[in-house]
Image (spheres, rainbow, N blue to C red):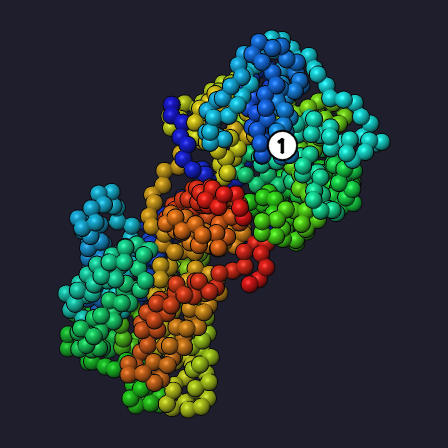
Amino acid sequence: MKLLTTSAPHVRTEDSTRKVMIDVLIALAPAVVGATYFFGLYALVLSIVGMISAELIELFIMRVLRKDKNFVPNGSAAVTGLLLALNLSVATPWWVLLIGVIFAIAIVKHTFGGLGQNIFNPALAARVFLLVSFPTAMTTWYKPIASFKGWYPADVQTTATPLAVLKLQGFSKVMESTTYTDLIFGNIGGCIGETSAILLLLGFVYLVFRKRIKIFIPFSYIMTVLIISSIFYSVNPEKFGSPIFHIFAGGLMLGALYMATDMVTTPMTLKGQAIFGVGCGLITMIIRYFGGYPEGVSLSILLMNALTPLIDRYTQPKIFGRRQK
Amino acid sequence: MRLLTFKGGVHPPEKKLTEHEEIKKAPLPDKVVVFMAQHAGAAAKPVVEVGQEVKTGQIIGEPQGLISAYVHSPVTGKVISVGKINSNVHGMAVEAVTIERTGSDEWELLPKVDYQSASKEELIELIKKAGIVGLGGAMFPTHVKLNPPKPVEILIINGAECEPYLTIDHRVMLEMHEEILMGIEITRKILGVKEVYIGIESNKKDALQLLEEKWNGKVKVAALKTKYPQGAEKQLIKAITGREVPSGGLPSDVGVVVQNVSTMIAIKEAIIDRKPLIERGLTLTGEGVRKRGNWWVRIGAPISWIINELGGGFTEGFEEIKVLMGGPMMGIPVASLDIPILKGNNGITVIKEQKRESTNCIRCSYCVHVCPINLQPYLLDMLSRKKKYDEAAAIGLLDCIECGSCTYICPANVEHVKSIKLAKKVYRTLRGGKK
């Protein structure tokens, strides 16, 4: 018999990093099903390639390059790989995704120290990296085929995303080809994982139920977008588009619910999380209205990632028994 | 019923395996080891010699300095050794007196007083003579605590017992409420307070009802939400009075004194029965011990004796175990079963080590939300491990109450409390005791 004297507390939850990551993957499952339904089996292929390649690359980095013999995959890389895949157009070749995954895991995550140490959301940073490296593949959008039609959506029409249409042709033109129902259910052009708001919300409810999400972020993010777009809509509806449109179009749902809530790269305090969400909302709308790109979700979250340490520093709550500073 | 509570905290599985076991009187141990450091502050000085005959209740250690306490012989017998014994509980070798029992109890009682007519000073002196310390675990000398630097108007009796497994406070409230009430009346007189509360967690419904009925409003019974660390002094005061003890301050800064229920029994026994503190109730529990129960035992009884005589030995199949002095959240694992029961020892918990996988912090922010002191445990852990003690102190290193909620909840299995405890020690040493 051996007496152990390890440190208190001597009971812990049965929780683990792996369980957190698996919950995020479960929450994204409806979005993957939706992507497959709207864009064909190739969307499913992209999702699986993203997850598996990310885990393999991380395993290689940890075991071979960082010489951690005891490393066991924990699912965090799979989350990054899947989120990156869901942020691509179905027109993206699989090897472009692979380059993105390598960039995400090796450069964005592990040069900063690996799990929990990265400043920027790896999936988003990789997406922006691919956007500037492969602009054509990354901005060719197919119309959803809305049924299983084989591996790859060949011979289907290319389209512009509703946000691009808004920017170039105005809001009435958007509403000619797109209905709100399409926007909410996802029958529109765009990244494979971002189009169906309803499926993303389904996974979000699961995360809230499992307490796996910094809930103030999506709330303040979406509220900010709602308020700003309402103001601008009342000024010039044709130029700026309706608030409902802005909430359901583009990557806002995917970004606000899954990217802006990435645990590692977002603030720790509730006040900080609210500020983070407001910042994301502001920058998103500035880019959507006045920027060179039609969509600003990725860039806004990355910019706020950079501010996270600063936000954390200035939003520490009052310590018990101390006076408010 | 409206449940009072504080902000933050966790709810570990309660595992109150022994809540229906009546308190049994343990037989007298044949040998006792009595540490001279069984209280916060300076260790007592042994005043007996090897070979000397001692009676039950005889003083064997005298206090050194203002914050210290008397130590008494728990049995009638012969001193067989006086000297330092290694104790990982104290973190060093500590002076101890080992006594072999030679027969049944021959008492040396405390002086007689009539508590109705005695002065406050006389009562405090008697409590000091009885060697009473806080029996909830902190072991702060009670005679010091009952003489607060500022006037107080509220006395809170701590019956929260928020540690999983432990049930002794629960049992004494059910079985010894008359003694507790007498202790409260004496304490009330000493402090000169009008208002007395007893705080009890809602998972002890029977105790809440019983005291409400028996005490008949003499003490206000406050039902507390079952949440850890509800029994921590500052959290208890916050829950019941809404007052926040200032950082670095004492409960008397907000006009409150907190006492554990078992301490009330010790006070009653000292003043009414003239018995110094040589025995107490404790819970012997955990999956690793065969017979679990609540016992009234002599202080100084070795843990090995407790486990074999009272617990029937270890459960089979328990090879690598933790024998904890206290409960699983804040208990100290003993490195040797020769270590004896201390005055502040409310339980012995025998459990298995929980195997868990650790990763880097994933910044989930769970620790920030459960911290009852509103600290940033992830940051304190990081700064402590990087030896940035001044930075850690600036964000509340010394405010941490080491309750372990952050480490309990952490999915990455980060050892916040371990690094914070170490950092506190180093920081205090580096600062030479200066604040």
Does residue B101 appear anywhere in the picture?
A: no
- The x and y percentages for residue B63 are 63, 27
Callout 1 secondary element: loop
- Please give the name of the residue rendered at 67% of the width and 49% of the height, measured from the top-left corner: B253
Number of marks in the rendered image: 1
Does residue B399 appear anywhere in the picture?
A: yes
Placement of B110 over or under A5, stated as above or below: above
Q: In this view, does A41 lie to the left or right of B163?
A: left
- The x and y percentages for residue B282 are 58, 28
- Please give the name of the residue rendered at 27% of the width and 75% of the height, measured from the top-left corner: A190
According to the image, label 1 marks what residue? B65
- The x and y percentages for residue A203 are 38, 62
- The x and y percentages for residue B242 are 66, 54
Placement of A312 over or under A188, stated as above or below: above
- Please give the name of the residue rendered at 54% of the width and 52% of the height, measured from the top-left corner: B373
Q: Is residue B91 or residue A263 the one in the foreground?
A: B91
Q: Is residue B361 or residue B424 the one in the foreground?
A: B424
Q: Is residue B156 or residue A169 the one in the foreground?
A: B156
Classify mark 1: residues with Cα within 10 Å, few (<14), some (14-19) or many (20+). few
Q: Residue furthest right?
A: B117
Q: Mark 1 lies on which chain?
A: B
Q: Quadrant of residue A126?
A: bottom left
Placement of B429 over or under A305, stated as above or below: above
Amino acid, disc 1: Gly
- Please give the name of the residue rendered at 19% of the width and 61% of the height, measured from the top-left corner: A102
Q: Is residue A235 or residue B97 the one in the foreground?
A: B97
Q: Is residue A97 left or right of residue B174?
A: left
Placement of A80 over or under B232, stated as above or below: below
